[in-house]
Amino acid sequence: MVVGTSGVTASDVLAVARGGARIELSAEAVTALAAAREIVDALAAKPEPVYGVSTGFGALATRHISQELRGRLQRNIVRSHAAGMGPRVEREVVRALMFLRLKTVCSGHTGVRPEVAQTMADVLNAGITPVVHEYGSLGCSGDLAPLSHCALTLMGEGDAEGPDGTVRPAGELLAEHGIAPVELREKEGLALLNGTDGMLGMLVMALADLDMLYRSADVTAALSLEGLLGTDKVLAPELHAIRPHPGQGDSAANMLAVLQGSQLTGHHQDDAPRVQDAYSVRCAPQVAGAGRDTLAHARLVAERELASAVDNPVVLPDGRVESNGNFHGAPVAYVLDFLAIAVADLGSIAERRTDRLLDKNRSHGLPPFLADDAGVDSGLMIAQYTQAALVSELKRLAVPASADSIPSSAMQEDHVSMGWSAARKLRTAVGNLTRIIAVELYAATRAIELREGLTPAPASRAVIEAVRSAGVQGPGPDRFLAPDLAAAEEFVRGGGVVAAAETVTGALR
């Protein structure tokens, strides 16, 4: 992965965070770093105070710092700001935020020396992951505590996880990999802390996960429609063309592709006639489609933030070093919260379809709870309880973090975004959605197999065969259910639902 002054993409972030891609600095980036540093050095030599170069920080910015204390100032900001608490943050999140901070450093707008940027790349390449904690960012002035813990590792202080997964003193790990700790100079400590990198990294990864989960949800909704003997007429392209929301049309097209050739659809006028399917079945494309359109908006925000150089102050090409408010996380925080709302609604409608499959009064001929011998067997009764509990938590997680603000730094930072908190709860929501879709998959595949004498669509058969091969068992007497649900969850998380369907349908939208 070659990092220049611009052009980092979401795929680049995923490659480094999840794929362990190695990083190199381009010649262009090194030149830009050196040029910006010259500007900072020139300002540092002047008697006039410049924020971040020769002053204190935040509410302490009024103090002018003498030349001999500036190195200590930069070290101290890192040490004092590395004040996180709580559980450790996941390795992929830490790698994403480190890479994104390096991306901004390489823009040439931060005033950091080339050797500091190279050390950041060396630490990532060595597989060294700073210990970062859950709490410590208000999403304004950057993800301060998380980024400070990363900067502490660059200084050879604090704790970090080695490539073998063992947490050790950072200085030992740097020495083992031949990496010299950095000696921070004017502006550099501040520049390593002042970014939206943590919340942006989590947004990028959530978008990748949700892209797969929304396609998986289209497949499981189609399977549920088959299990309930519903009609696929509501998926006709001409119906969605007259309400032209792009996501809705894509979801309907995916469901229709999965249902192609099914013998289970269109039986809504048989023994238990119904004019229309329930909303959870009939409106599946509308709900999933709205979420897809939300993803598209969030992706646009992420792309803009990836193209940004977020720091305060920033070095401008004309030689000025200017303070600004670009570190405020509101644009990212809003879409993180918006996605949590969409995720909650997608999980909610999936749970309603599952409950319908299990209720003999609404399932159109299926046994109660899809049990083998109802009464002796409880079937999937409690699997739906688990799914309902997950949905209930999704609703709580949908409460926006960005609607809150709490003043800090003696009222200097009197309005904050809470974007880091929005990102953390979205990660939990994405995990819950994966499990909810897994339960619907488990119920829908069992329901289809219980419809004896009717052949499901070829794509549905491909999904059923794949999930059974993954260790998720089919209908039968009650058994220890948790392992089946865990296997279904792993199948969904790994993209198995989409991959199996696409062997028949081709690429889903």
Image: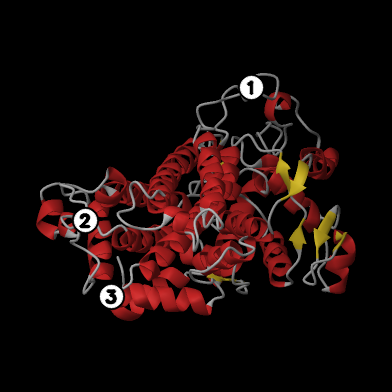
Identify which amino acid the numbered label 3 is placed on.
Answer: Thr
Q: What secondary structure is found at the residue carrying circle 1?
A: loop
**Label 2 to label 1: alpha-carbon separation:** 44 Å
Residue 201 placement: quadrant: bottom right
| Of labels 2 and 1, the one closer to you | 2
Q: Nearer the viewer, residue 105 or 170?
A: 170
**Label 3 to label 2: alpha-carbon separation:** 26 Å
Left/right placement of residue 479 relative to residue 353 reads right
Q: Quadrant of the N terminus?
A: bottom right
Q: Mark 2 highlights which residue? A: 249
- Specify which label sits upstream in the sequence, 1 or 3: 1
Q: Is residue 52 above or below residue 412?
A: below
Residue contact between numbered discs 1 and 3, judged by CB atoms under 8 Å: no
Q: Mark 3 highlights which residue? A: 455
Q: Mark 1 highlights which residue? A: 407
**Label 1 to label 3: alpha-carbon separation:** 62 Å
Identify which amino acid the numbered label 1 is placed on.
Answer: Pro
Question: Is residue 310 something that shows in the picture?
Answer: no
Q: Position of residue 446 (x, y in %)?
A: 43, 66
Q: Position of residue 435 (x, y in %)?
A: 53, 56
Left/right placement of residue 163 relative to residue 336 reads right
